Image: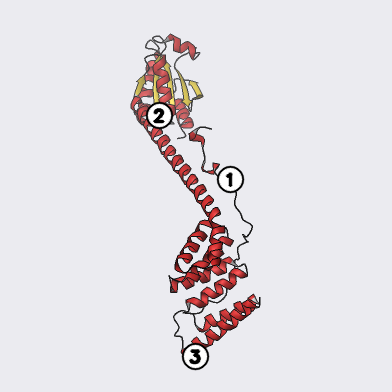
Amino acid sequence: MSRENISDEIITESDIELDESDVVAPDNGPFEEMGYPLVEVSEENQEAAEVLKSDALKAICEGQLVEAKDHLTEAIMLNPKSALLFASRATCFVKLKKPNAAIRDADAALQMNPHLARGYKTRGMARAMLGLWEEAATDLNVASKLDFDEETYMMLKKVEPNANKTKDHRQKYEQLHRENELRKLELESQRIQKVAEANRVLHDGHVIEINDGMDLQTKLSAANTTSRLAIIYFRTTWCGACCYMDPIFQTFAEKYPKIVFLTVDIHELPNIARGWSITSIPTFFFFKEGNVVDWVTSTGKHKLEMKILHNDVS
């Protein structure tokens, strides 16, 4: 496979062997109440929230996770300014295998307290459940540095292999993407340069007299590169009809400057005339995208212009 044909999709997720045994489907709500953070929290509400928090911890120990979650939600409604309450409910959501809800609560806790280890721990565990390996490893690393515990350490060791593989995969993809973009830019630059060079050999608004077969190929190639219609006018000086059409052809060249107007004198260049099977003059061939798309033998100005308008769809 050539480098210019490599696509970004050549590196896919299927190229990575990951341990996704603990990955779960994302939960998409509805989510629990978050309380009103601007409300003034009374001492009475703070105390009531602490009681509910204790009830929740007891419920967790007994395996009553839904009951624990409900206690914590009630506590949050009483005291929505407690980062620990949100972190505790995030832990409960992790156990309930609701990672998005856990991340939502962990984000709220960390917004209140950016140094809360439990917030990073629960968010890291939730991200791991969603297969967000690099983000999970980052959170768990921060949690370990803030407040080391065995559970965080073991979770980090489980997540890191996937995170490293994902990181390597992403870096390879990004490198390939950069190479593709550079190649596209290089090809576009080459295209622009070719168009500029082609335009230099074409003279807008003028009739170009062909000197030989190579000259004709050069002009047709330039017209093709610039996606322009080329009209080859086969004529000669001793032809009365050609003498009539010569100024008309020049007028059209001035009127339609983005069309390439070429003339071939069949007396001076008989080999070209034979190659194009010219049997009468004046004859006009319409050439576009590497092919003859039309032709006409005519001394009529109106008929020739109709052909020009019909074939010039640029």
Question: How far apart, in angstroms, are the residues tagged by discs 2 and 1?
Answer: 51 Å
Which residue is at a point 57% across and 83% down the rendered structure image? Answer: 54
Nearer the camera: disc 3 or disc 2: 3
- Residue 138, image x, y percentages: 48, 60
Of the residues shown, which amino acid type is indicated by label 2?
Ile
Evaluate whether residue 256 shows in this view.
no
Which circle's residue, 1 or 3, is located before the other in the chain? 1
Number of numbered markers: 3
Question: Distance from label 3 to label 2 (Cα)?
Answer: 86 Å
Residue 25 image offset from top left, x and y in percent: 63, 61
State which quarter of the image contains the C terminus.
top left
Residue name at image x 43 percent, y 25 percent: 230
Q: Does residue 182 sit above or below 284 in this rendering?
A: below
Mark 1 secondary-structure assignment: helix
Q: From the top left corner, tell me how far across and down residue 134 is, in percent.
A: 51, 56
Residue wearing tag 2: 259
Farthest residue, direction front: 150
Q: Position of residue 285 (x, y in %)?
A: 47, 21
**Amino acid of disc 1:** Asp
Q: Secondary structure at mark 2?
A: loop
From where the camera sits, is residue 14 visible?
yes
* Left or right: 52, with 256 as reference point: right
For residue 15, the mark is: 1
Residue for point 38% across, 31% down: 195
Q: Residue at x 63, y 79 (%)?
A: 59
